[in-house]
Image (spheres, rainbow, N blue to C red):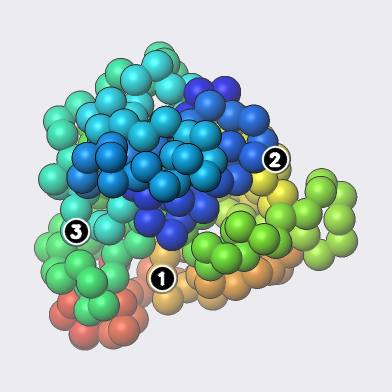
Amino acid sequence: MKIGIIGAGQIGGTLTRRLRELGHEVAVSNSRSPETLADLADETGATAVWAKDAATDADLVIVSIPQKNVPDLADGIVDARTPGAPVIETNNYYPQQRDGEIAAIEDGQVESAWVAEQIGAPVYKVFNGIWWKHLLENGKPSGTANRIALPVAGEDGPGRELVHGIVDQLGFEPVDAGPISESWRQQPGTPVYGKDFDADRTREALGAATPERTSEWSARTDGSPA
């Protein structure tokens, strides 16, 4: 499969490594020039490209950048992907820690819906709540007891099937977390975020989530709904 990755930080770089190990063709980019990714390209065999070219003819696109930088992406950044190819976004909104205030999110827009609006394409939310080192090292074969589960929010259909397949290949149990409108259940501050739960406990945690944004994860620090 041809995969384009926009963002080469801890999650984007880890996915580059793991997906290349699985034999996928990977084009990876960051906010700078391809030359700045020479070490990662040499290590993995991935192709370093400009961000505007990462999605070209891709069967899957992954966006993994700081939330505050999403509006800086080129217009139509994922439009050159294969028709119908799903787009994964792994982002989290960290208003106090990194991103500053994003008014639409603070006013109640779901984080992933905001990303989809910015890039002009529907998205699947996955890989946002797992520590990069566990993503790199803790994948297990399907059927392994207590296999780490990862929630996947997004539309049903072939795109979801492909995304679930990638999660499984990487060694994790994909759990249907509903549509993007429900992806707040896996945002920072929710019971599932940052946890290495199995599938049953992941479903329980998603069900226990509440939409209120806690003060730690708000720029306004007043617990207003998100």
Q: Is residue 178 above or below residue 78?
A: below
Q: Left or right? Give the position of 128 relative to 173.
A: left
Question: Looking at the image, which is closer to me, 163 or 186?
Answer: 163
The numbered mark at residue 96 is: none
Q: Nearer the viewer, residue 184 or 133?
A: 133
Badge 1, how many Cα within 10 Å: few under 14, some, many 20+? some
Residue type beneath disc 3: Lys
Query: 37 or 64, which lies in front?
Result: 37
Question: Residue 76: x and y, percent?
Answer: 20, 27
- How far apart are the alpha carbons under marks 2 and 3? 30 Å
Q: Position of residue 3 (x, y in %)?
A: 48, 29
Quarter of the C terminus within the rendering:
bottom left
Of badges 2 and 1, nearer the viewer stands 2
- Residue 33, given in percent of the width and then of the height, sits at 22, 40
Q: Separation of disc 1 and disc 3 at Cα? A: 15 Å
Q: Residue at x 87, y 61 (%)?
A: 145
Type of the residue with mark 2: Gln
For mark 2, does the 10 Å Cα neighbourhood hold few (<14), some (14 to 19), or many (20 or more) residues?
A: some
Asked if marks 2 and 3 touch (Cβ < 8 Å), the reply is: no
Q: Which residue is at a point 38% across and 56% down the rendered structure image?
A: 9
Marks 1,3: beta carbons within 8 A = no
| Residue at x 20% of width, y 67% of height | 99
Q: Identify the disc placed on residue 169.
A: 2
Q: How many marks?
A: 3
Q: Earlier in the sequence, mark 2 or mark 3?
A: 3
Q: Is residue 56 above or below residue 27?
A: above
Answer left or right for 105 relative to 23.
left
Q: Quadrant of residue 84?
A: top left
Q: Which residue is mark 1?
A: 188
Report which residue position mark 3 lands on: 68
